[in-house]
Amino acid sequence: DAKTTQPNSMESNEEEPVHLPCNHSTISGTDYIHWYRQLPSQGPEYVIHGLTSNVNNRMASLAIAEDRKSSTLILHRATLRDAAVYYCILRDVDFGNEKLTFGTGTRLTIIP
Amino acid sequence: NAGVTQTPKFQVLKTGQSMTLQCAQDMNHEYMSWYRQDPGMGLRLIHYSVGAGITDQGEVPNGYNVSRSTTEDFPLRLLSAAPSQTSVYFCASSSTGGVEKLFFGSGTQLSVL
């Protein structure tokens, strides 16, 4: 199974940008990089995903390294509502590998 | 659309009792899965299914059974509950393939005494 590695925790000041890293050195050419976040006492929710190119949506941006062995989730202006656990996972483009493992993620604390 | 619906939200069991956690989705998703989350920990995959009639084991399958007789439903059965199964359980669904995102239910908090 393709694995990801994330720091256990990070802190950021409110209204500052936040860069959350993820290493996935064993990524295959057909793996999409997905990010999810889990707010306190809630189920995880989708944030963003991409394959090779950088991606933007209303929640965040995803920067993918040229060799695809790492990626960074960027929250452009953190708010207190962004305090959550952020998970980076890999998901194969094809039907073949759906054993999706999440790991422990990065706990993001926002300082007012 | 209701999305992914989990019932019950809370459950207390005695050791040795059996029960079924229900998960239903109305998005015609092929992929469904069950995770457990212990306090302060990440999500661990219990079982998953890529379509009706197809199930497979995840990281921590022992003590749990699943079946997928319809596309919509993916129940998780605890045959003989143990205190070690006290956890929060999340169900997820998706269309298959990496381009698709996962949708999660709101969770079932289970306590086994």
Image: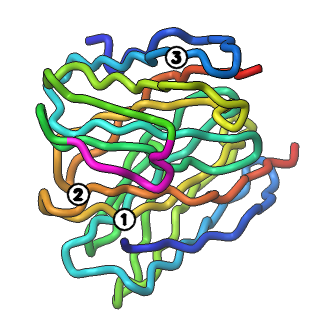
Q: Which label belongs to residue B18?
A: 3
In the depicted view, which residue is nearer to us: A71 or B76?
A: B76
Determine the secondary structure under disc 1. Answer: strand
Query: Which residue type carries mark 3?
Result: Ser
Front position among marks 3 and 2: 3
Please report the bounds of the magenta region as a residue range. Answer: B55-62
Query: Which residue type carries mark 1?
Result: Leu
Coordinates of residue B101 in the picture (x, y in percent) = 30, 44
Which residue is painted at 34% across and 69% down in the image?
Answer: A54
**Subunit ID for the residue under disc 2:** B
**Subunit ID for the residue under disc 3:** B
Coordinates of residue A108 in the picture (x, y in percent) = 73, 53
- Does the magenta-highlighted stretch encompass residue A94? no
Quarter where residue B87 is shown? top right
Query: Which residue type carries mark 2?
Result: Gly
Horizontally, residue B108 falls left or right of residue A93, namely: right
Which residue is painted at 62% across and 40% down in the image?
Answer: B37
Coordinates of residue A90 in the picture (x, y in percent) = 36, 65
Which residue is painted at 26% across and 55% down in the image?
Answer: A98
Q: In this view, does B63 lie above or below B88?
A: below
List the residue tagged with mark 2.
B98
- Does the magenta-highlighted stretch encompass residue B58? yes
Q: Which label belongs to residue A90?
A: 1
Horizontally, residue B79 falls left or right of residue A13, namely: left
Determine the secondary structure under disc 3. Answer: loop
Query: If you read the primary sequence from the N terminus, does the residue marked by circle 3 or circle 2 appear first?
Result: 3
Contact check, label 2 and label 1, Cβ < 8 Å: yes
Front position among marks 1 and 3: 3
